[in-house]
Amino acid sequence: MADVLSLEERAASFRERVKSAIPGGGNLDMCMLCGTCVSGCPASGLAGMDPRKFVRMVILGLDEEVLSTPWVWMCTQCQRCIYACPMEVDIPKLVYEARASWPRDQRPKGIRASCDHHVQRGGAMGIPKEDWIFVVQDVLADVRSTQPGWENLEAPIDKKGAPYYLNQNSREPVTEPEEMVPLWKILHLCGIDWTYSSEMWGGENYCMFLADDDNWARIIAQQARIVDELGCHTFIETE
Amino acid sequence: MIEFYAKGIREGKLKVNSKWNEAGIKFTVQDPCKLVRQSLGDWIADELRFVVKAVVGEENFVDMVPNKSNNYCCGGGGGFLQNPYVEERLKFGRLKLEQIDRTGAKYVITPCHNCHSQIMELARHYGRDFKVVHLWTLICLSLGILAENERLYLGDDLKECNLPGKHA
């Protein structure tokens, strides 16, 4: 990076591409170099990069560096930078577009696997539908038979006409199923009539983190269709 | 779900109180970036605090600084937990760790799953003894309906606190 850069020779195609992809061009040209983004960004300094530097590199057309730095996978797109930025420069969207520019098979394997699992099996951990249903029913049966006062606890799956739909982070049923129970108990006490779904039940969406627009949308659309078919009017996110 | 916790408490369906925390164990909370800053805004962070204070006792809640929409990311989001840059992720988390250290809290409440995993790993990696818990655990603990096998993330100080059928 110490060499003098010749900017004329660079096509800056990434800059042009993101400008048309982000509403209002992402305010890229508005950056005043104040550094507010850097001071509140926990990813500042990782991989020799920080948000302000990244913006400058995009503006200067340093496409090769911008599109190869692993920093885009170390930024969590938490949006603290754009929240603090006086000019609302959309750095998280820049990072997203840079991630999307990586060939899919070169993006981090773990995120890719979580995305693929979700598309194929309804949750990022990739357990088959039958296992998901079994775990819920097994844990429920255990609570009903061993915990006095909870004989009528419910954890319905695909219950038509339930007003509330609940998604489930896919970690619990796989690694710590008992952790699902406190939430069921709370819903019971609140008198909320709810249901899980047997398909596309996962509460996460790693396709978004993978910057895989098509599969991100596919998961959302399929889940929305399921919620509509069940007749639920409210979608409860476990957070 | 935080909305429903708050509604349940206000409507008297979740009769929580902080009597179980007579020892005055201190709690702090990690505002999830996606829920607060990116989606719903500060009102949901305020609801979160309403629930937490009702459950652990107002005097036992210590906020991080900065917080709510201005909070720092812990480093568990964006797919960071699923990619190979582990060393960088732990460095990323130091800012969060310092924030938690300054609260002096023994428990960090994380409504977000990714925060839960990342902050637990930060504690383990940097040798801290604070615990990281889900909100549902504490609500059920307060209500006296948290079974023994639902206490995976509680420390020894709360493993037997307010067990079902054993409280007055």
Image: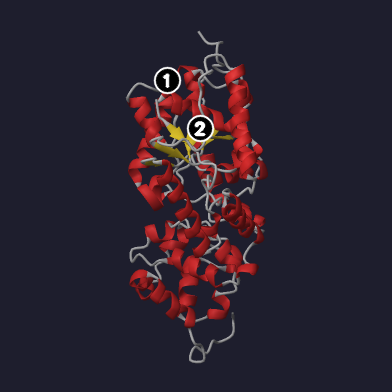
**Looking at the image, is A119 positioned above or below residue A94?**
above
Q: Which residue is mark 2?
A: A156
- In this rendering, would B43 be left or right of B96? left
Which chain is disc 2 placed on?
A: A
CA–CA distance between discs 1 and 2? 29 Å
Q: Position of residue B125 (x, y in %)?
A: 67, 45
Q: Which residue is mark 1?
A: B17
What's the residue at 36%, 73% (across, down)? A25
- In this rendering, would B36 be left or right of B166? left
**Looking at the image, is A186 positioned above or below residue B66?**
above
- The quadrant holding residue A221 is bottom left
Disc 1 packing (10 Å; few <14; some 14–19; many ≥20): some
Disc 2 packing (10 Å; few <14; some 14–19; many ≥20): many
Q: Nearer the viewer, residue B105 or B2?
A: B2
Q: Amino acid at mark 1?
A: Asn
Q: Position of residue A14 (x, y in %)?
A: 48, 78
